[in-house]
Amino acid sequence: MKRIAAEKAVDYIENDMTIGLGTGSTVKFALKKIGKLVNEGLSIKGIPTSQNTKKLAKKYQIPLTTLKEAGEIHLTIDGADEVDQNLNLIKGGGGALTREKIIAFHSKKIIIIVDDSKVVKSLGIDFPLPVEVVKYEWEATKKALERFNCEISLRKIMNDPYITDNGNYILDCEFDRIHDPEQMEIDINLIPGVVENGLFIGLADRVIVGGSQGVMTLEKEIIQS
Ligand code: 5RP
């Protein structure tokens, strides 16, 4: 399901585009397909949103650039952990939310690729909201986040804190549900120590959902098969 969504998104890539390359297991399928097309003659450049994606892009021989060098991003293809009916997202399951949001913000078009388990009525019911925080006095930042009525855990790998590509921690914030994602995105980022949060509001132009019956494309207000 992830693969069919990813491959459908790659159909939107045109010659000479600069492509934002998201992060995660769904994006991996897109990278593989892009690499195949590049080897067949497609001319594009990619901007990776994580060290993992950079490694994969190199493996699939996708030429890379930076936003500074390219000046613009025509299209970004990225995954998500949850998608609601307004195409608002929770991202950051793979820990790359800050770089992903920077690239999304500067992209002309954003296509999100997910399997159908990620489409939800309300954000935050099934997936905790990741918040990237600086290490310095992170416990105080955690305490300030508790004001939002969530259960917070420091993301760990085995017994060690998970470290982002930017050298920071991730606090995973579990809500019953997020009532006002637009406001919460703003409010969380006002807390000193918070680098970025995983709410992506109003950024996605199109969500391609892979399901057992094939793919479905969600666009703002429009649902097409
Ligand atoms: C990484 C992300 C990923 O796009 C998100 O976690 C989805 O990952 P996957 O495609 O592996 O389910 O936001 O920071």
Image: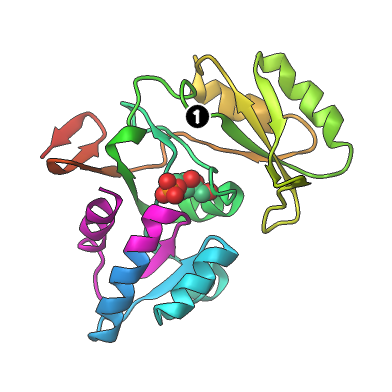
For disc 1, does the CB lie below 8 Å from ligand 1? Answer: no
Which of the colour schemes (rainbow, by chain, secondary structure, one colour) is used?
Answer: rainbow
Image location (x, y in percent) of residue 148:
66, 16
Between 72 and 184, the residue placed more toward the observer is 184
Q: Is residue 29 left or right of residue 135?
A: left
Between 85 and 54, the residue placed more toward the observer is 54
Q: Which residue is mark 1?
A: 127
Quarter where residue 22 is shown: bottom left
Magenta segment includes 21: yes
- The reply to whether residue 107 is in sight is yes
Relative to 186, residue 159 above or below = below
Q: Residue at x 57, y 18 (%)?
A: 175
Quarter where residue 19 is shown: bottom left
Q: Label 1 is placed on what type of residue?
A: Phe
Kindly give the residue lying farthest to the front in the view shown: 158
Q: Is residue 175 left or right of residue 106?
A: right
Image location (x, y in percent) of residue 125:
47, 20
Image location (x, y in percent) of residue 206:
28, 44
- The reply to whether residue 17 is in sight is no
How packed is label 1: few (under 14 Cα within 10 Å), some, or many (20 or more)? some
Q: Residue at x 46, y 54 (%)?
A: 24
Looking at the rendering, the stretch of residues picked out in magenta corresponds to: 1-29
Q: Residue at x 60, y 28 (%)?
A: 186
Relative to 88, residue 170 above or below = below
Q: Is residue 15 left or right of residue 73?
A: left
Image location (x, y in percent) of residue 85:
31, 26
Q: Secondary structure at mark 1?
A: loop
Relative to 143, residue 50 above or below = below
Magenta segment includes 60: no
The C terminus - image quarter: top left
Q: Residue at x 22, y 29 (%)?
A: 221
Q: Is residue 14 left or right of residue 154?
A: left
